[in-house]
Amino acid sequence: MKRIEFIRQQLKDCQYPVVIIETGQRFDSDADLITYLLKNGANTPDGRIVRYSKPDKGDIDPFSMSLYEFIDSMIEADTVIIDDI
């Protein structure tokens, strides 16, 4: 859980991500992306999350890359991992 808390703080501290749903519209939530995905999976009231913005691969450090890969896997799996967040 400490790692998830650290990742959440990292997301809050950066300008990314902008989340896009299947309709092509931007999706905004009061929760950070990881918290939202853990609670709801990739589903939103307006459609499924299909992508989110991230910096170019050349601009990503190894830790951040693992964070983005973690988010990608949660979107792809489209499952709720933790119920009580």
Image (cartoon, rainbow, N blue to C red):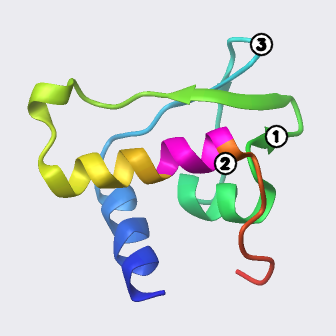
| Residue 78 among those drawn in magenta | no
Q: Amino acid at mark 2?
A: Ser
Above or below 74: residue 17: above
Q: Quadrant of residue 38?
A: bottom right
Within 10 Å of the Cα at label 1, are there few (<14), some (14-19), or many (20+) other Cα atoms?
A: some
- Label 2's element? loop
- Label located before the other in sequence (1 or 2): 2
Image point 69% across, 46% down: which residue? Answer: 77
Residue nearer the viewer, 3 or 17: 3
Label 3 SS: loop
Numbered badge on residue 79? none
Q: Within 10 angstroms of label 3, few (less than 14), some, or many (20 or more) residues?
A: few
Label for residue 23? 3
Left or right relative to 19: residue 21: right
Given the image, on which type of amino acid does mark 3 rest? Answer: Thr
Numbered range of the magenta stretch: 71-76
Mark 1 — residue?
44
In the displayed orientation, state which residue is furthest to the top.
24
Percent from the top left, x then y, of residue 20? 61, 24
Say the numbered circle drawn on residue 29.
2
Image position, residue 17 (x, y; %): 43, 38
